Amino acid sequence: MKTVVPLVSTACKASALANLPRMAPWTPILVILIVVVSGCKQPIRDVVPPSTRFIAVMSAYAPEIAANEAAFLNGGQPVKVTTINGVAFKHVRFEGRDLLLFPSGVSMVNAAMTTQLALNRFPISHVLFAGIAGGINPAHHIGDVVVPDKWFHHSEAVYANPKPDGSGYVLPEYFKAPYTNFSFMFPDHVWTVRAGMAKPAKQEFFPADPALIEASRRALKTMPPMTYAGRTAEVSVGGNGIAGPVFMDNREYRKWAFSVWKADCLDMESTAIAQVCWANKTPFLIVRSLSDLAGGQEGVNAADTTEGPVSAHASIVLREIVRQIK
């Protein structure tokens, strides 16, 4: 069993001791105990064996979580469950690897917050995600699986008023539109910063780790057959994905988004996870199976009926990729 203890920096302890000019022989011990309990504002990490490095395996909500646990636990039990801020982190041993299974939560803020929490609290070597998405590339079908190597925001944007004469839109002076607009919505790149940068800069997309993309291509050779609605699912590696805090179910927006980003899928978490990993210089890879056509269908969106079996496709693909990680 691992124990969880707060860690306090040497500098923090030294500062506390330096403020006491005369101390009895036992006083330093008492001061250190007080500092450990009350603490300087230092990050707290779970204490794990020095050799342990986790491969994080994320999913957003119940059907995806169940699919990941079926793929990597196979009816077994986790080594340990650690709950932080209401999020259950499950340490799982899978074929000699230490995995950390946990939910991102649904949508961008939850996904970013939980990814950063995990990176702060656990020694993580890679961040992986398996879940469902809407398909916006007309070449793909429900049940297919995509593994994009670039992730873009589609909802970073300026929403503009029309000009009085109807000739266009009134845009702020600072804004130089990098993409064509969808009505009053003008998408933009996102401002980012990380260690080694002198100041924030705009980032167009966040690239998946090249070694994990290569592992994905190797995994294609070992992939078991998967079918949905009588059709054999296809798995593709590479290409673009987009994400934003919107359940997108609009045919015209779908057409426009594909024309702008040539993306294979659209979801509500991936680019947030990608951006956090980029900021922390942590390798990441995201696997998405298509549960719906993001508005390309006739009538009601099918995601509520497809989410279970299609989630399994993403988790099976991710399992085969994990087996290829060196």
Image (cartoon, rainbow, N blue to C red):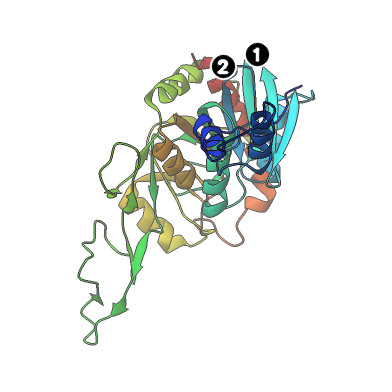
> Relative to residue 122, is residue 324 depicted above or below?
above
The number of callouts visible is 2
Q: Secondary structure at mark 2?
A: helix
Say which label, 1 or 2, has the lower sequence index: 1
Between residue 5 and residue 106, name the one nearer to us. 5
Can I make out residue 89 in this image? yes
Badge 2 is on which residue? 323
Between residue 32 and residue 91, name the one nearer to us. 32
Residue 297's spot in the image, x, y percent?
53, 56
> Relative to residue 161, is residue 195 depicted above or below?
above
User: What's the CA distance linking mark 1 and mark 2?
Assistant: 8 Å
Residue 92's spot in the image, x, y percent?
69, 24
Q: Secondary structure at mark 1?
A: loop
Between residue 31 and residue 264, name the one nearer to us. 31
Q: Amino acid at mark 2?
A: Arg
| Left or right for 164, reference 236 | left
Q: Are marks 1 and 2 in contact (CB under 8 Å)?
A: yes
Residue 271's spot in the image, x, y percent?
44, 46
For the residue carrying disc 2, how many other residues have a C-alpha within 10 Å: few (<14), some (14-19), or many (20+)? Answer: some
Residue at image position (45%, 37%) is: 277
| Left or right for 238, reference 28 | left
Residue at image position (44%, 31%) is: 282
Residue at image position (52%, 52%) is: 108
> Relative to residue 325, is residue 104 depicted above or below?
below
Image quarter for residue 173? Answer: bottom left
| Left or right for 162, reference 280 | left
Q: Amino acid at mark 1?
A: Glu
For the residue carrying disc 1, how many other residues have a C-alpha within 10 Å: few (<14), some (14-19), or many (20+)? Answer: few
Residue at image position (31%, 53%) is: 189
| Left or right for 199, reference 263 | left
Badge 1 is on which residue? 95
